[in-house]
Amino acid sequence: MPHLPTAADVADAARAIAGVARRTPLLSSPELDAIAGARIFLKPETLQQTGSFKFRGAYNRLSRLAGEDRQKGVVAVSSGNHAQGVALAGQMLGIPVTCLMPADSPAAKIERTRRSGAELVLFDRDSDDRYAMARDMTARLGAVFVPPFDDFFIMAGQGTVGREIVEDLQVMGVSPDAVLIPCGGGGLTAGCALAIHDLAPAAAVWTVEPEGFDDQARSFAAGERLSNAKTSGSICDGLLSPEPGELTFAVNRHQVADSLVVSDEEVKRAVAFAFHELKLVVEPSGAVALAALLSGRVDVRDQTVAIVLTGGNVDAGLFAELIG
């Protein structure tokens, strides 16, 4: 097993991305407090660079490259948000970026990745082996592969979300009882859990996944990594990882209290709630933790709870349908 990050590595990542990544605020909502019977705080990474938390890990990873590695560039595989994060980080640091993205990724994510200067290679989500394609391209270019979640520096960078949550709550004189985190490959969860449990050891960290793609929940129950039976079929395009990462699972199996699963219909209602009640644009993948709260998937009465809204990159047509 390769070396795994610690809370100290998350703190180091916080220093690396300071002044580049945005420190997103914690937002409160009387409506949510009343619905949950709890004190709810939202972490809107929708306001982050590129509209997603993914920029944090991408910049932390690319900023560690030096010399020839910077010149030859990097290759990333992503349904969209990781691609945008790597592309912008590469543009800022002068590092060439090639991104492999599913052809059915939201058009906005494809266009914004291209706009940041990345070379795009589109693939079929259901039939193409994305990682085999990435390995071939990395070897051909002599580039560095930057995975979407299963990477030491990616996990540490994403963990700054959890670190900021606890730090900002401590300023208010409170500590989180629970933190709900949308989960695909598990990189955000892993980094956040390390930081949260370092600063607030008693806090429970929950993952939230879409129905039919609950590989984390099933893997935790089985004690080993299990795959999803399919790679498409949910509006939560950013959470359709084939299976938990090797490194992320090694961290999360000891850090996560439990896993929650929500339906696409519950996610749709959460996206609409975020717009109408909170005035936030949240993509379906970014709204699953909010969906779990609104649907009563977990009882948090009388607790202090943080909900991570991971991204806001949704095509206008779909968003209009969801909020209608």
Image (cartoon, grey):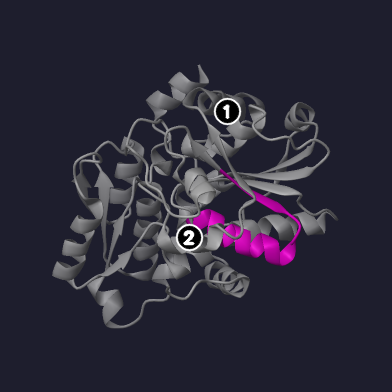
Q: Is residue 271 above or below residue 179?
A: above
Picture disc at residue 37:
none
Q: Earlier in the sequence, mark 1 or mark 2?
A: 2
The amino acid at mark 2 is: Thr
Q: Position of residue 122 (x, y in %)?
A: 21, 46
Q: Is residue 196 magenta?
A: yes
Specify whether residue 183 is in view: no
Residue drawn at x 33%, y 70% as measured from the top left? 94
Q: Is residue 247 left or right of residue 124?
A: right
Q: Residues within 10 Å of mark 1 (few under 14, many from 20)?
A: many
Q: Is residue 68 magenta?
A: no
Q: Is residue 216 left or right of residue 292?
A: left
Marks 1/2: CA–CA distance = 27 Å
Name the residue nearer the viewer: 50 or 69. Answer: 69
> Which residue extends farthest top?
324
Residue drawn at x 79%, y 54% as measured from the top left? 175
Residue drawn at x 45%, y 22% as measured from the top left? 320
> In this rendering, which labeled residue sits more in front, label 1 or label 2?
2
Name the residue nearer the viewer: 39 or 255. Answer: 255
Write the start and end of the magenta stretch as one range.
187-207
Magenta: main secondary structure: helix
Name the residue nearer the viewer: 59 or 190. Answer: 190
Picture disc at residue 270:
1
The amino acid at mark 1 is: Ala
Q: Is residue 120 above or below residue 16?
A: above
Q: Position of residue 225 (x, y in %)?
A: 42, 53
Q: Which residue is mark 2?
A: 248
Name the residue nearer the viewer: 126 or 41. Answer: 126
